[in-house]
Image (cartoon, rainbow, N blue to C red):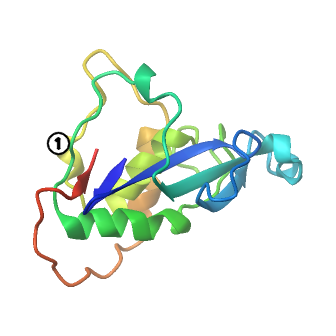
Amino acid sequence: MVQLGGDWFAIEMGPAWGIDAADRGVVCEGPVGLRWLGRFRSFRYEVRCWRGGGIPDITEAVDSPQRVSSTRSQAEQVLALAPEFPPAAWGRDELIAGEMWNSNSLVAWLLTRSGHDMDGIRPPTHGRAPGWNAGLTVAQRSPRPSPRPQISHDEDSGHR
């Protein structure tokens, strides 16, 4: 979840067939399992970045939410980067990153590419996040985007 001013944005990865709302904020799609299966909607995922959206299984999360930043510029950067997420096959290691690509990869990729200090962000105690290291690895392969002009820090902005 990303807060920017008074607005909340949900960024999530889910099945392309899961939500039919036209305004669900789809920014990219990718195949599930095998690339060729992605031509069928039932084997595609979508990355959504939508104002006022929600994350259906958020109540199942452990130790959440965790604020990872309170700077407006990083919140803006995360939102701007969502459409650039590499749509590799979910559940596979197409990008040779050492583990499968999934929703944890999305979060790690976004936070890394937006300049967050990843040394302080860890899975919950006794928890794990398969795919996290794949997101870190792929994000570090490309140079970071040019920093945006610094905007005043607003304690009401940030993301969790």
Residue 55: x percent and y percent? 49, 38
Placement of the C terminus among the 4 image quadrants: top left
Instruction: Determine whether 103 is above or below 69 in the image.
Output: above
Whether residue 95 appears in this view of the structure is no
Which residue appears at 45% of the width and 49% of the height?
10
Question: Which residue is label 1 attached to?
Answer: 120
Q: What amino acid type should be assigned to the residue bearing mark 1?
A: Gly
Q: Residue at x 51, y 57 (%)?
A: 49
Relative to the observer, which residue lies in front, 123 or 59? 59
Q: Residue at x 44, y 20 (%)?
A: 60
x and y percent of residue 107 in the render? 42, 47
Q: Is residue 68 above or below residue 156?
A: above
Residue 3 appears left or right of 136: left
As displayed, is residue 152 above or below residue 154?
A: below
Residue 37 shown left or right of residue 11 in the figure: right
- Seen from the viewer's position, the closer of residues 105 and 143 is 105
